[in-house]
Amino acid sequence: MKFIIRRENLKKGLSIVGHITTKNINLPILNNVLIRANSGGVELVSTNLEIGIIHRLRGKVENDGEFTVDSKTISEYVNFLAGDNVEINEVNEELKIECDNYKTKIKGESAKEFPLIPTLSGENYCICEIEDIKRALSQVIFSVSNNENRIELSGVLFSFFGSRLVLASTDSYRLAEKEIGINWQGEAIENQKFIVPAKTIQEFLRIISNFSDSDSSEENINQVKIFISDNQIMFSVDSTDLVSRLINGNFPDYRQIVPEKFNTSVILNRNEFSRAIKAAAIFSKSGINDVGLDFKGGKLVVYSSSGQSGESRIELSCEQNGSDNEIIVNFRYLLDGLNNINDDQINLKVISDNSPCMLSPTKEENYFYIVMPIRQ
C-alpha cells in the first residue's frame, strides 16, 4: 500500500474515525484504525463493534492495500506535521510516513483480523437537512435515560410517517419530542419505529459538527442520508458513513401521557425565566433540586427555600390564560428544556401540582418538552 494525501484531509479524517476506537484487552485490534487504499481513493475505518465509521478521502494511490495502526499514535503524530502532503507507505508490517522533513515508522497489524463493517445500501433511504437533524437530535438527546436496566429508554425513538420524522426520548421524569420534514428516495417508510442508541446519536452529532459549507464543494454537503434495516441504521453525510446497531426493545407509548388540555398557560421571556430559575436554584434542597412556580393574576413567582441556605422569591410578568395554579419541579430538568428552545418567548402550560407541565417555543409547533412534578 502506498499513497499521497493532503495533510489537512488526513488530519480531519483521523479525527472523525478515531473517537470510537477503544482499549480492548480481548480484541486489541479495536484500538486501531484501518487504512485502505485502492483506485477509488483512501478509506479510514474504525469500530467498537457497536458503531462503525467509514471516512473516504481523495488521494493519489500508487499501490493498493490495507493496514491497521494504533489510532491514537497516528492521530497525534499527524497533528504535528506541517507540510502540505503526506506520503504513506506500508512496508514489512510498518507504516512509513513522510511529510517534508518529518519521517517516521509506526508498527501495526494486518487488516485480516479487523472486524467487517456492514454497510447499508439500496434505493430506499430518506434525506434531511444537516441543520434540521442536528438541531432536532440536540433537542431530544439530553432526556435519554442513563438507566442500564431499561435499555429501551437508552436511545432516541425514530418514528417514520412518510415525509415526517418524529424524534422522541424520555427517562421517565421528562420527555422531549421534535418533528422534522424528510424526503424519500424510493418507497417511503410508513408508521415504523426504531430506537437508536444515545451513544450513536452523540457520535453522529460530533461527526456532523466537522462539516460546514466551506468544507466541500459537494452539492449534498448540507444533507444527510438515513438508511434503515431491521437491526441497523446508517447515517451518510458527505464522505462519511456511520453504521450502528439498533436497540431491540419496545419504546413506551408516550403519547398516552402527553396532556391535551391544560388549566393554566403562560407566555414568558425565555432568558428572564431561565435566569430566575438559576437564581432560585441556589436555595433549593440538595438532592431534590426543587423550585416552585406560582401562577397568579398575570404574575409568575419562582420560589425556593432550604433550611440550610435560606429562601428566594422572584416575580416575573407573563401573559396568563386560565386559572391560577402552582407546581414544583426539578430545576435541572426545567433548565435543560429552556436551553434547547430556540425562541425568545416560551409557552409554559400546567394542569395541576400532580400532573406534568409542558414547555414549548411560541413560534414552533413541532417541539415540546414535558417535565413531571415533584410531589410534596
Image (spheres, rainbow, N blue to C red):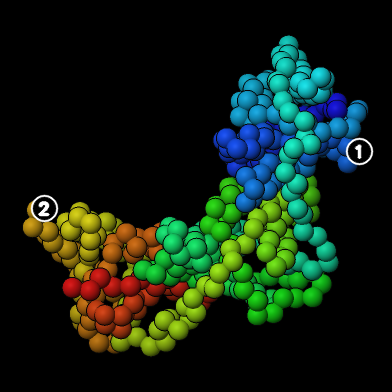
Q: Circle 1: is it few (<14), some (14-19), or many (20+) Cα within 10 Å?
A: few
Q: Can you tell which mark lies on residue 363?
A: none
Q: Nearer the viewer, mark 1 or mark 2?
A: 1
Front residue (pair 212, 30) = 30
Q: Position of residue 335 (x, y in %)?
A: 35, 60
Q: Position of residue 70 (x, y in %)?
A: 65, 29
Q: Can you tell which mark lies on residue 309?
A: 2
148 up-or-down from 101: above or below: below
Residue 224 visible somewhere in the drawing: no
| Separation (CA) of disc 1 from disc 2 | 68 Å
Mark nearer the N terminus (1 vs 2):
1
Q: Position of residue 337 (x, y in %)?
A: 40, 64
Q: Residue at x 73, y 14 (%)?
A: 103
Q: Which residue does the numbered mark 1 point to in the structure image?
A: 39
Q: Residue at x 73, y 60 (%)?
A: 225
What's under tag 2, amino acid-wise?
Ser
Kindly check if marks 1 and 2 are in contact, taking CB atoms under 8 A apart as contact: no
Q: Residue at x 66, y 26 (%)?
A: 74
Front residue (pair 344, 302) = 302
Front residue (pair 164, 315) = 164
The outermost residue toward the top is 101
Residue 376 visible somewhere in the drawing: yes
Quadrant of res 324: bottom left
Q: Secondary structure at mark 1?
A: loop
| Image quadrant occupied by the C terminus | bottom left
Quadrant of res 21: top right
What's under tag 1, amino acid-wise?
Ser
Q: Secondary structure at mark 2?
A: loop
Q: Circle 2: is it few (<14), some (14-19), or many (20+) Cα within 10 Å?
A: few
56 up-or-down from 294: above or below: above
Q: Position of residue 116 (x, y in %)?
A: 75, 46
